Image: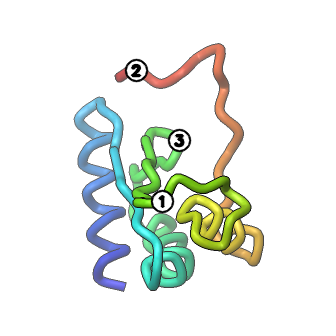
Amino acid sequence: AALARLVAEAAAEAVASGGRFTLGLSGGSMVELLARELPPALSATPGADPSRWLVAFCDERLVPPEDPDSTYGAYRVRRGRGGHRERPRDRRNPPPN
């Protein structure tokens, strides 16, 4: 829970300064940990608006998202089991850099 709180607090600080929060996500045990702990941490942290995040999936393998070794795929599958669901992006009005 401490890591999720730290992420949410850093996000709120970045958003409050008028910016965007950038986060690189690794795979492995981080998928389950963040999928479970980040949604409650975000709910408890006003201003940590996920629509202002830029998320990069750190993956040393060049594989399609459906591949079992894909970091993005692992988060996408976990999200489908009750994890955080992002809102669709409005490409007409993207957030400022």
Quick check: 6 left or right of 38?
left
Upstream in sequence: badge 1 or badge 3: 3
Give the spatial CA distance, label 3 vs label 2.
11 Å
Q: Residue furthest right?
A: 80
Report the residue marked by disc 2: 96
* Residue found 75% across the figure and 77% down from its top: 81
Report the residue marked by disc 3: 51
- The image shows residue 7 at horizontal and vertical percentages of 32, 64
Q: Which mark is residue 61?
A: 1
Give the spatial CA distance, label 1 vs label 3.
27 Å
- The image shows residue 21 at horizontal and vertical percentages of 34, 44
* Residue found 44% across the figure and 72% down from its top: 41
Which image quarter: residue 84? Answer: bottom right
Q: Which class describes the residues within 10 Å of circle 2: few (<14), some (14-19), or many (20+)?
A: few
Q: Secondary structure at mark 3?
A: helix
Give the spatial CA distance, label 2 vs label 1.
31 Å
| Three-letter code, disc 2 | Pro
| Three-letter code, disc 1 | Arg
| Three-letter code, disc 3 | Ser
Q: Secondary structure at mark 1?
A: loop
Q: Nearer the viewer, residue 11 or 80?
A: 80
Q: Nearer the viewer, mark 2 or mark 1?
A: 1
* Residue found 62% across the figure and 70% down from its top: 74
Q: Secondary structure at mark 2?
A: loop
Q: Nearer the viewer, residue 84 or 68?
A: 68
Location of residue 94 with respect to 41 vertically, above or below: above
Location of residue 80 with respect to 17 vertically, above or below: below
Quick check: 20 left or right of 80?
left
| Pointer 2 with pointer 1, Cβ within 8 A | no
- The image shows residue 43 at horizontal and vertical percentages of 51, 67
Q: Quadrant of the C terminus?
A: top left
Upstream in sequence: badge 2 or badge 1: 1
